[in-house]
Image (cartoon, grey):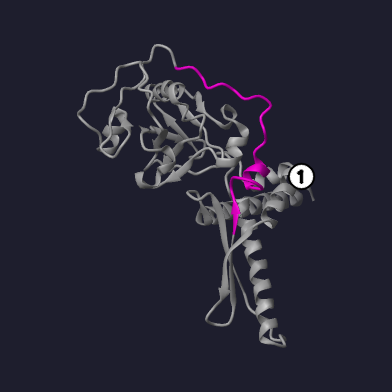
Amino acid sequence: MNRLAKVLGLMSLVAAMLVASMATVLAAENVDWNSNVIRATGGGVAPAGARTMAQARMMARRAAIADAYRQLAEYVGGVNVDSETTVDMAAVQSDVIRTKVQATIRGARIVSEGQTSDGGYEVTMEVPMFGVSSLASAVIDRPAVREAFPQQVPNVLPAPVKPHDGGGWITPETSTASGHGSSAATAPDGKAIGSFTGLIVDCRGLGLKPVMSPVIKNVNGSPIYGYKNLDYDKVIENGMASYAKDMSGARRAGSNPLIVRAVDVENHGGTPVLSVADANRVLIENGATHFLDNTRVVFLR
């Protein structure tokens, strides 16, 4: 009997893992990390017993909305809060979070709707990831204390930077990795340029996984950027970063960004890792213009 219970428990665990994995896959396909929304399109048809065209249309619309809500619940559950936790995991651990997430889904807004050519009905709905009544406000807790950004690693000079052909400034390591950069003289070692409007971390080719609450570390394992370093209300309103495929989608970093190349990603692909020299450069420049404080961060993936 005990053996049967163990087998059944193992089967339940495997089933739960499969469901969680599927939810994550669905979320990856239906979360817009540039616009920071989760989007679902539901479809519905009128039952055969509808008495009038108007009633048929109303019933098909109602079915489409119900279908969109169902899909949103699946997609939202698979969104990564951080590199270790999905929304579903957080909801299982806390009744308060589960109630807030359900309320967020119920507050989804309709962005488009209409009849289909075959007489059915489609409704597209969105849940905001950040802002008022957003997913972030449901799953990201306010820290007890706001932590200061760390100091630079001693005895390691901040990486020098060069003007980037596409705008902003790029570290030599990034220049070598991406094939861009300029032969102009580098900025003085150890000194802030002080004009950067944001940070772009190039993680292309490393398998970066988007998360709502990202962390940036140096190769020593020390975090240099996380939500506990930031104004909580600003994180909930704007998020901590955006994710883009190329420089054209990196507007959040402003017109003169600092560009660095991640050397690795850790924690299931959710945490970009920088060289110590690049991390020191980021910290010294943030001390001058506070782009990290203002969440002007973009990850290229």
Q: Which residue is at 49% across, 39% downward?
A: 241
239 sits left or right of 273 in the view: right
Q: Is residue 174 left or right of residue 140?
A: left
142 falls in the magenta region: yes
Magenta-drawn stretch, dominant element (helix, strand or loop):
loop
Q: For this rendering, which residue is in front, 3 or 214? A: 214
Say which amino acid is labelled 1.
Answer: Asp
Residue drawn 65% across the image and 62% down it: 69
Q: Residues within 10 Å of mark 1 (few under 14, many from 20)?
A: few
Q: Nearer the viewer, residue 114 or 24?
A: 114
Hey, which quadrant is residue 173 in on the image? Answer: top left
**Where does the C terminus fall, quadrant-wise?**
top left
Decide: is 173 above or below 54.
above
Residue 50 belongs to magenta span: no
Q: Which residue is at the front of the view, 29 or 280? A: 280
Report which residue position mark 1 lands on. 95
Identify the residue shown where x is 68% and y is 72%.
Answer: 62
Residue 249 at x, y percent in the picture: 39, 47
Residue at horizontal 64%, vertical 46%? Answer: 132
- Disc 1 secondary structure class: helix
Percent coordinates x, y for residue 296 in the rendering: 47, 36
Residue that lies at the very extreme toward the top in this rendered image: 155
Quadrant hosting residue 119: bottom right
User: Which x, y percent locates residue 204?
Assistant: 37, 42
Give the percent coordinates (x, y) of residue 234.
Answer: 58, 36
Does 35 sit above or below residue 279?
below
Q: Which residues are magenta?
A: 126-152
